[in-house]
Amino acid sequence: MNDHERHYLFDCATAGVQGLQPYQPGKPISELEREYGVRDAVKLASNENPLGPSPRVKDAIQAHVAELARYPDGNGFGLKRALADRHDVDLKQITLGNGSNDVLELIARAFLAPGRGAVFSEHAFAVYPIVTRAIGATAQVAPARNYGHDPAAMRAAIDDSTRVVFIANPNNPTGTWLPGRELEAFLAEVPRDVIVVLDEAYVEYVREPDYPDSIPWLDRYPNLVITRTFSKAYGLAGLRVGYALSSPVVADLLNRVRQPFNANSLALAAAEVALGDAEHIARAVHLNDTGMQAWQTACKRLGLNYIPSVGNFISVDVGRPAGAVYEALLREGVIVRPIGAYGLPNHLRITLGTQDENKRAMAALEKVLG
């Protein structure tokens, strides 16, 4: 293919897509091994649960392998029923997705278009600008407050073209959160023709007393959509299943643009069992709490600032451009995440791993910075 053909094909795409940069996931271990010849690597780059899925979930997956030749239940009735019972909502308020990223895209497709805009915060999750600009809508970025969301700035960014506001609580990659009083005050001020998306991908890890239980708000704010995932605390990142809770009207609109069978049969079976495995979640949260304390202690010992986080990760200011530190850590067999693309060029986001993984990463970081 010559340069003329490349330019021709590129120009065939919409302007919104042309202006995007592809989402960069955490480097897989297999890629590190190919490129650097490293063995026994530690991956702390993608906010995965180091415990993985519970034994009960693995049994459920195995039990459904024999049915892989069949299409899954396109309505996901079993998982929806379990979610409805857990959250005390109606089945008609639930939308299932191929991970919660899929649900975020459904929201953009249903409510955004050229001439419309979405508001989100500086340092917010990278998928928000991707789904906004891909649809041809305008991204309205509100300045952050202490690395997190500033409700006043976000309210000021809303104008007549705004149709969606994205709020990650806790936020990725900073781990910051909004307390309930601030968040509900913001909801009360937002025009009712603006959809407010409350992305709670890390909700299971949060221990703060002022963190809100947002689900009762659905009755008071019909423009509210809450998204959650099984990829983090539940350990099902490889199966890709998430969901949204909303008013029945919004759920109906989202399901009109949802692809058939977007949640596969293994994901549906695993998520339904995982939802009821409280013991496994408790173990994951305890491991996370222990890891957070260890990393905060290590940062203080090394003289490094970090952003206080309530997720399963910590963003550390390494005091210099983080790209070179990231590369040096790769050579030590430790994969973390540089977050310069989020406007934080000196920070590395580090997922909290097992005790041994954390110790190895801390030792590697100290060596590289030394």
Image: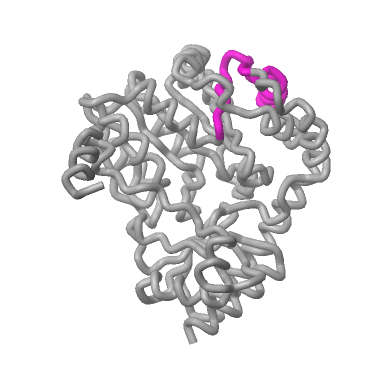
Q: Is residue 310 magenta?
A: no
Would you place residue 285 above or below residue 43 in this image? above
* Left-right relation of 325 to 217: left
Would you place residue 42 above or below residue 363 in this image? above
Residue 227 or 169: which is nearer the viewer?
Answer: 227
Q: Position of residue 280 (x, y in %)?
A: 78, 46
Kindly identify the residue that appears in the image at 47 percent across and 50 percent down: 172
Q: Is residue 92 magenta?
A: yes
Kindly identify the residue that appears in the image at 44 percent across and 75 percent down: 325
* Left-right relation of 166 to 264: left
Q: Position of residue 103 (x, y in %)?
A: 49, 30
Q: Position of residue 186 (x, y in %)?
A: 39, 34
Rendering quarter of residue 281: top right
Residue 43 or 275: which is nearer the viewer?
Answer: 43
Kindly identify the residue that appears in the image at 35 percent across and 56 percent down: 341
Rendering quarter of residue 324: bottom left
- Residue lying farthest to the front in this orientation: 1
Residue 180 or 364: which is nearer the viewer?
Answer: 364
- Residue lying farthest to the left in this orientation: 4
First to last magenta residue range: 74-98
